[in-house]
Image (spheres, grey):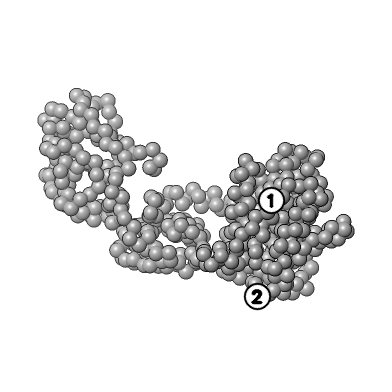
Amino acid sequence: MEKVIQFIKNRSLIEENDRILVGVSGGADSVYLLRVLCALQEKMNLSIKAIHVNHQIRKEAAGDQEFVETLCARWKVPCKVVSVDVKKIAKKYKLTLEEAGRKARYEIFYKERDALGGGKIAVAHHQNDQAETFLFRIARGTGIEGAGAMKAFDDPLIRPLLCMKKAEIQEELINAGQDWVEDATNEDNAYARNQIRNQIIPLMEEVNSRTVEHIAFLSEDIQEVMEYLKTVLEKQYHKIVKRDEERRLIDWIDLKKQDLWIQKQIVKRALEETAGRRKDIEKRHVRDVFSLMEKDSGKQISLPYQMVAEKSYQYIILKKKGCEKKQQVQGILRQEKIQDFSNILEKDCIKIIDYDKIENGIQLRYRKPGDFFVFGTEGRKKSLNRFFIDEKIPREMRDQIPLAADGNHIVWIVGRRVSSHYQVSDKTKQYLKLEFIREKGDE
């Protein structure tokens, strides 16, 4: 137990006066975890509560529940039991029983934590779990980010047993005369994780008896590298990807300037954000987006979860099929008549125009059919759509650009340029200051 207590101290997993909710299934790992916490309770003034989730799958489930309730009563630990129909959840969300059980457990854990007013959630993952997860993800085709370790502290989750192998845990319980319950399904090799646990890892341990420990350490090293790379990725992602609620626009010219790994991760993250989930976004989908970059503007490809990727000049646009463009401009246009503008600095969001040339009043809106724009000293007239094409503004962005319009005559393409018809001259008598102000949070 001293090994675990030292690990808790080194990683600052538990502090004095902590409130801890601990998941207890009745298996060796969770029983040992509860035993450790009870040993620390008085010394650190901990508030401990156990929670047991009855999955209602195995006929032994009622016996497991009774064992946990009896154990907690003996150790004077408050215990809450929650029963859940895992088979029903699996059917509803199209999950395996293992996935559905995990989903149910963690939802219950977090709900109970909230009811308690916060605190930490202690779970009993150990080094064998770390190694099994690593091998399982590799077998399923994970990238480097998926090979990272479970964290000892992943607020509010704590995993105090990640320094221990399963055999060490069981040995300490046996020496202490402490029993536990066994889950017979852990021996069923029809489950992929059980196959890794019962067949693959034992074979690897014939090569090196410290296999589990070595895999766990490697996984932790990968996690540390990934934490560093994520900071680099985060910075570049926000420079290269423009976002709104429904779309992601990837500037592939800027993207190509990055290292290849960063390029792939930016595309993968943009796909995940557009899809609203990470599951089933695979390397082949990232490759498909890269292939699209080499095609002509206007080309599209279909992707999972009703997503579409479209090449539009220097952008790859990711969106859901049938997503509607915004109808309401996310901002306001402030208009102010002024007599002198010599002390006003014109910027992308502030323009000065000739007030007397306005015919219908100015409206802030998005583009409409028939819109036109005047440019050049000779006052050439061009349809707004043609102007956007000539300026190589992606089709999707054209519907997102705010316009100050005088009827169908576009006075100001906000953030870009003012129609030459409205520009001030030495003949201007009255001036109008236009300022576009974004709504708070619309960055």
Sequence-wise, the earlier of marks 2 and 1 is 1
Instruction: Tell me if residue 318 can be seen.
Output: yes
- Look at 73% across and 61% down and name the residue there: 64
Question: Quick one: SS at disc 2?
Answer: loop
Residue 292 x/y as whole percent: 37, 66
Which residue carries the number 2 mark? 190
**Viewer-closest of 305 and 101:** 101
Quarter of the figure with residue 65: bottom right
The answer to which quarter of the image holds residue 257 is bottom left
What residue is pinned by disc 1? 80
Q: Residue at x 19, y 44 (%)?
A: 410
Front-most of residues 211 and 13: 13
Task: Say left or right for 47 vs 276.
Answer: right
Q: Position of residue 76 (x, y in %)?
A: 79, 46
How far, Cα to Cα, is label 2 from label 1? Answer: 32 Å
**Could you tell me which secondary element the residue under label 1 belongs to?**
strand
Three-letter code for the amino acid on which mark 1 is drawn: Lys
